[in-house]
Image (cartoon, rainbow, N blue to C red):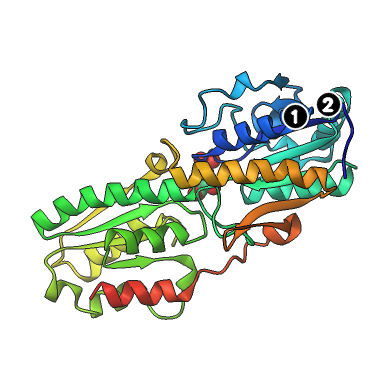
Amino acid sequence: MIRKENFSIGVLTSGGDSPGMNACIRAVTRSAISNGWKVYGIYRGYEGLINDDIRPLTTESVSNTIQRGGTILKTSRSKDFMTAEGRKKAYDNLCSHGIDALIVIGGNGSLTGAQQFASEYDVPIIGLPGTIDNDLYGTDSTIGYDSALNTIVECVDKIRDTASSHNRIFFVEVMGRDAGFLAQNSAIAAGAEAAIIPEDQTDVDQLAQFIGRGVRKSKNSSIVIVSEAQKDGVGGAMYYADRVRNEYPDYDVRVTILGYLQRGGKPSAFDRILASRLGYASIEALKEGQRNVMIGIANDEIVYVPITRAVKKDKPIDRELISVLSVLSI
Ligand code: F6P
C-alpha cells in the first residue's frame, strides 16, 4: 500500500486520440490529487516525455473537459520512444521531475511501448485502454469505442437515405485497424446487410457469399460495412467496390470512407463513465502496489490485466455477433 505523502504521478495520452480521453485525464488527476499526490501532465505522449514537455496539473486544469473529444494533453505516435536512446531520455526526465509512477492512456502500440519501458526501468506503469478500436484483450470496452460506434451508426443512417432512394449498394469503410469490432457492431446497430471484418476471413469469398445470398432480390438497396484492413494494397471498401464493378456490373455501387469523422466528437455517456471509473481505478491500483497492468472492465467489474497480455492482439470477436447480423439482415 502506497502512503507516501509527496508521491507524484505523470499522465499521458498516446497513439490515436479517442473520445473520453479527457474524462480519463480528469479522473486520474482528481483522484490522485484527492490522495494528496502531485500530478504532472506529459504533453504529446511519449514525445513530450522524451523532450521534457511536462507540466503540473491541478483540479482546475481539467475543469470543463469531460465533454470534449480529442485529448487536452495532445498525443503522438513516437518513433523516438521505440529507440533505447529515446527511452533513456524519457526515464531521465521522469527522474528529474521526481515522478514515481506513470499512467499511460492509449491503445495497443502505446501500451506495448509502456511494457518495453517497464521492462527496462523501475517505474510502475498503469495502462488505461484508450482507443476507438476496442482491440485490447481483457476489457469489454475501450475508452472511445462506444462514441465512435454511435458516430458510425448516425452516419450510416444518413447514407441509407441515399442508398434506398437510388437502389444502390454502399460500401462504408470504418476504422479499427486490423480489428472488426467497430464494423461488426455498427453493422448490427445500423441494420446493415453485411459486415466484412478481418476476423472472419476464411477461404470463402465474402463478397461472392454476400451477393449469392440474393440480398438484391429482396431489397432494393444494401449497405455493407467494411473494415479498413487493407486488401491487395487498398482499403477494404475500395477493394470490394472495384470487384463489384468488375464482376457484377449490373449493380450501382458507391463508397463512403468515414475516416476521422468517427474518431472525433463528444464522448458518449458510456465512455465518460467508463473513463471516469478506469481513471479512478488507476490510482486505487497504484495505492495497492499494482504495476504494469492495464485496467479494464469485464462484466461491469474493474479488472487488472497484465499489459503483456492485453497487447497480444488476440481479443476474440464474439462469433454470435456474426450470426446475429446474418440472420437479421435477410
Ligand atoms: O487506433 C485508432 C485508429 O483510429 C485506427 O482505427 C486507425 O487505423 C489508426 O488509428 C489511424 O491512425 P493515424 O491517425 O495515426 O493515421
Q: Residue at point 49% right, 69% down?
A: 199
Q: Say whether disc 2 or disc 1 marks the residue closer to the N-terminus.
A: 1
Residue 93 numbered mark, or none: 2
Q: Residue at point 31% right, 54% down?
A: 172
Position of residue 149 in the picture relative to residue 145 (left or right): left
When asked about the image quadrant of residue 237, the answer is: bottom left
Decide if residue 311 is in sight here.
Answer: no
Question: Which amino acid, by three-letter code, is at mark 2?
Answer: Asn
Disc 1: which residue? 49
Q: Is residue 74 above or below residue 330?
A: above
When asked about the image quadrant of residue 247, the answer is: bottom left
| Mark 1 neighbour density, 10 Å: few (under 14) some (14–19) many (20 or more) | many
Position of residue 102 in the picture relative to residue 238 (left or right): right
Q: Residue at point 40% right, 64% down?
A: 184
Q: Secondary structure at mark 2?
A: helix
Q: Is mark 1 within 8 Å of ligand 1?
A: no
Decide if residue 184 is in sight here.
Answer: yes
Give the quadrant of the N terminus: top right
Report the number of numbered marks.
Answer: 2
Residue 61 numbered mark, or none: none
| Mark 2 neighbour density, 10 Å: few (under 14) some (14–19) many (20 or more) | some
Q: Nearer the viewer, residue 315 or 279?
A: 279
Q: Position of residue 144 (x, y in %)?
A: 50, 45
Q: Are marks 2 and 1 in contact (CB under 8 Å)?
A: yes
Give the quadrant of the C terminus: bottom left
Q: Is residue 52 above or below residue 124?
A: above
Q: Position of residue 288 (x, y in %)?
A: 82, 48
Q: Nearer the viewer, residue 330 or 230?
A: 330
